Amino acid sequence: MTPSEPSVVRPKRPWLLRERRGVEPTTSMELFFDLVFIFTITQLAHYLIAHPDWRGAARTALLLALVWFVWIYTAWGTNWLRPDQAPVRALLIALMLGSLLLSAAIPEAFAGAGLVFALVYATLQVGRTGFAIWAVQGQPWLVDGFQKTLPWFVGTSLLVVLGAVVGGAFQEALWAAAIVIEVIGLSAGFPVPGLGRSPAERWMVEGGHLAERCQAFILIALGESILVTGSTLAQHLDLRMVGAFVLAFAGSVALWWVYFARSAPAAAEVIARAGERTGALGRLAFNYLHPVMVAGIIVTSAGDELLLREPGAPASTVAALFTLGGPALFLAGHAGYKAVLWRTLPTSRIAAVLLLLALIPVFVGLGVPVAACAAVALTVTVAVILADRVTRERASQSRGPRSPLR
């Protein structure tokens, strides 16, 4: 090579990096890693049921956010690394073990197990990033990104550990601060003094893979909701309980339909073809909006368990919030998801969210049975599905055959 020729930068461990041959498939190792989070979602739903007040809801949200950070940043990592290679596979197995410990600590995360939760969280976030820096050596844009995220993960992890040490209201405040700082850092490109920032346009994301990963997590959350209702039904099986179970099951199917029937495959194509916008779209659609939908499923799952316990009981404020507010939260997250990807106003979802929230105080005041609340939530969700169908048919008639991406 002559002095005038530019040096070629080559990855030191190219066998650990995905080759970028179109949409990268989700591997069995990634799906195996996801299995731990079935337990996680169950733990979060049970925590919410055991603490049915505003503080319990806030704590559940904090726990979900921290757990989501562990999962989503692992999904981003495997967007660049090959899970079928032994070092990456070993990393994912270690992350599985840590995530299992994290989930086991959820019931006492604001009590005796808070420090265990915090130390495991810090180890997962910092350890995964350190491994990634080692694995991508020789790939400058990847090294740059991971090196800039590391100080942020160290800082937020220290806040989580400090919160667990001091406990009480300070724990909640410090964990909330860590989450806010994490969001700010991601939004700003994890700026580091002297090193600059890592803008989303440089992330070289394979969007179709990330979309598939998040779709898998939504399936996990929905599957957990069916698992919770099924286990509750098995404890006391009679005709009334079977009717309540069918209603809860239909609600889960309706949420699945809203997300998967048409928009999920089209969304994967939109993300995959976004070009330089892929990183920014992925950050908003996956890091920020998907946990809102997951939260909606968790709240709905808690409502389903209350439904199976006493389907004919008058709806308390908690029961109404769970059975009506859960689907509303899911639809709100999905409305944002559609608005971001397709740049349209999802009026049917917005109207459904407003209607469900407005009905909560009405149904509580009238003493409407829990089963009736769940039936109304199901009806509203089905109405959103039908509205989508009517919109597609009208668009098809007025414009002729169209792509789902238009």
Image: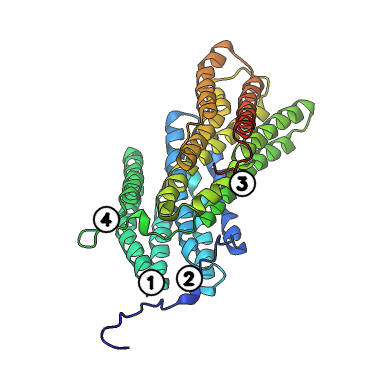
Mark toward the start of the polypeptide (3 vs 1): 1
Which part of the image, by quadrant, shows the N terminus?
bottom left
The earlier-in-sequence mark between 1 and 4 is 1
Q: Position of residue 126 (x, y in %)?
A: 38, 61
Helix, strand or loop for disc 3: helix
In this rendering, the label closer to the viewer, 1 or 4: 1
Q: Residue at x 62, y 33 (%)?
A: 392
Looking at the image, tell me whether mark 2 or mark 4 is earlier in sequence order. 2
Asked if residue 100 can be seen in this view, the reply is: no
Q: Using the image, tell me which numbered label, if any, was put on residue 191.
A: 4
Disc marking residue 139: 1
**Sequence-first disc among 3 and 2:** 2
Q: Nearer the viewer, residue 365 or 334?
A: 334
> Which element carries disc 1, helix, strand or loop?
loop
- Of discs 3 and 1, which sits in the foreground? 1
As drawn, is 207 to the left or to the right of 189? Answer: right
The alpha-carbon separation of the residues under discs 2 and 4 comes to 25 Å
Q: Residue furthest bottom?
A: 1
For label 2, the residue is 17
The amino acid type of the residue labelled 1 equals Gln
Label 3 and label 4: CA atoms lie apart by 34 Å
Looking at the image, which residue is at 50% across and 22% down?
Answer: 354
Kindly identify the residue that appears in the image at 42 percent across and 63 percent down. Answer: 128
Answer few, some or many: residues within 10 Å of disc 3's Cα (few below 14, many 20 plus, some between 14 and 19): some
SS category of the residue bearing label 2: loop
Q: Is residue 83 left or right of residue 59?
A: right
CA distance separating discs 1 and 2: 10 Å
